[in-house]
Amino acid sequence: MTKFHNSDCTCWNCPAINLAGKVDFRACGQSALKFEKKQDETGDSHIMAECKRRPELGLFDPTSITFEECPEWRETQYGYLLKNMRIMILGMDGYLGWTLALWLGKLGCHVSGIDNFSRRSWVAERGSHTIVPISDMTERLHAAKEVLGLNINFRKINILDRELLKEFIEEVKPEAIVHYGECPSAPYSMIDFEHAAYVQKNNVIGTLGLLFTMHEVVPEASLIKLGTMGEYGTPLTGRPIFEGMFPANAVLKWNNREWSMGGELTPRDPVSFYHCSKAQDTFNVYEACKYWWLRSYDVMQGVIYGVYTDHLAADPRLRTRYDIDEAFGTVINRYVAQAVIGFPLTLYGKGEQIRGFIGLEDAMQCITRLIAKPPEPGQYDVVNQMSGYCSMRKLAETVKKIGEKDFGLKIEIQRVENPRVEADRHPFEPIFNKLPDEFGFVQSDMLEKEIHRMFALLTRPEIKKRIEEKEHVILPKTWWSGEKKEVERLELIKNNNHAVKKNGKAVNIN
Ligand SMILES: NC(=O)c1ccc[n+]([C@@H]2O[C@H](COP(=O)([O-])OP(=O)(O)OC[C@H]3O[C@@H](n4cnc5c(N)ncnc54)[C@H](O)[C@@H]3O)[C@@H](O)[C@H]2O)c1
């Protein structure tokens, strides 16, 4: 029998469990501690469980059955998954949400989701459009059924509408909730007070409402919450960017004394009002797990690139969005689009800023593996989800190399003024071991392959035309200072060296 990352998990991790018996949650605190089974004078376990899926078992010790042994958990390439697992995706109409809906549906999960289509309005408000045309939700759902045989249960709901959200969650009873449903843009949050307040209310209050709803309706479901590597900032001391919490052997030394820092949240240094909303979410989710024994993985996600999965490519009506404007386009996606229309690739400032990245398919794999190994009751854990990191300049050079070599394009790189407040040069040592070590994440060697795929898609005449129509939204106009003016060119870079190292297994391509 294959050993998976979750083979030895027990009902203690399973969302189908109802805990019964003498459970004093408050006395236990964070439950990442090993559960110790104790007997009282009657011989009863202190914590007993019932299975919602197998009520015939009656009351039993929740540590006595493993996922490997339980017939409700079936083998998949990403570990054991609950049969017909009910998964709700918040923000299902978005770049990642739609991709995940098809991905999990094809894995046999019962997928439901909500969205209020705000991403479509934000991009229109910025005068842009997705350069890969996407269908409306009705057509998407129809195509998913027709082409992939999927029945996806979608409802148009604003997360801030707690009544409607609660009703839908009560109806579906999700066993895992993936929360993508936030405004994901730093520049959008920096436009003015109204936009900053909107982003913070949408994200922070939306998530807070969700936490209360989960507490009331599905406390045993796991919450996969999307944060961002930008929550940490880039500490200028060069200390490693740990995965949310200090490791057990970290110590604080001060005035000839020292303390263990193990298990404490690491400092956050967010880099925009959007990133502040994510950092506030982190604390709210952490607290909810502590107060109510909710379970959550907080995913500090690197910048995503690519628009390919087999399912998205199965039919034009199934495609996911691809934005190129300053607020909603992500960096690699923007570079490829710029290269296709002969717009010099835009490095901000010196272009030496380093960021973590991960391809779309790898990101889907990571989320699936997290869903497959739910946290224990009360467990809040953080993973840094990235597959490599490098400087903006090296990324631009990689895009240039592939576009010129494989597609015969002439590509230039320019430095423009940096409208953000950030260090141009900084040390960067992110730790991203948990996903490979504890969740079996196997990184595909996909950076160059995916850039090639993006060029193949974007050089199609009808897509190229859609990029050209929106060339005017490429250069940033939102300054962190509050100014509103297009950035100016500092330099057109003459000689680029192409010495970009290979993006192998979890390596730095800087
Ligand atoms: N794409 C990336 O590179 C990246 C990197 C790091 C973190 N993230 C995080 O991942 C998540 C998903 O990112 P994405 O790129 O798919 O963004 P997206 O904007 O495409 O998806 C978010 C979806 O949520 C919906 N939404 C937002 N607020 C809502 C509300 N109040 N009610 C209902 N629906 C609402 C939007 O309409 C949109 O469809 C976000 O939380 C983002 O911050 C993304």
Image: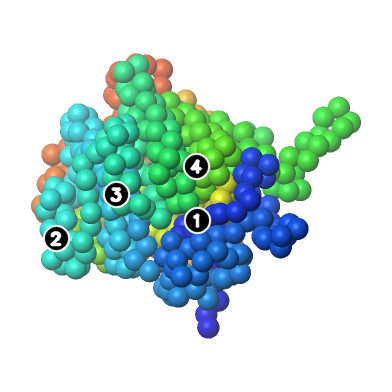
Give the residue displayed 57% in from the left and 70% down from the top.
65
Q: Is mark 4 within 8 Å of ligand 1?
A: yes
Q: CB atoms at circles 4 and 3 under 8 Å apart?
A: no
Q: Earlier in the sequence, mark 1 or mark 2?
A: 1
Residue named by callout 3: 171
Q: Which SS class for mark 2?
A: helix
Find numbered disc 4 in the image and state the secondary structure of the residue it sits on: helix
Q: Is residue 143 left or right of residue 66?
A: left
Question: Dot 4, crowdedness within 10 Å: few (<14), some or many (≥20)?
Answer: many
* Mark 1 crowd level (few <14, some 14–19, many ≥20, 10 Å Cα): some
Query: Which amino acid type is marked by label 3?
Result: Glu
Q: Please state if 500 lies on the left or on the right of 31 as rendered.
A: left
Residue that lies at the very extreme toward the bottom in this rendered image: 1
- Disc 1 marks a residue whose amino acid type is Asn
Q: Dot 2 corresponds to which residue? A: 143
In this rendering, the answer to whether 74 lies above or below 252 is below
The reply to whether residue 410 is in sight is no
Give the mark nearer the N terminus: 3 vs 1: 1
Question: Distance of mark 4 from mark 2, alpha carbons?
Answer: 34 Å
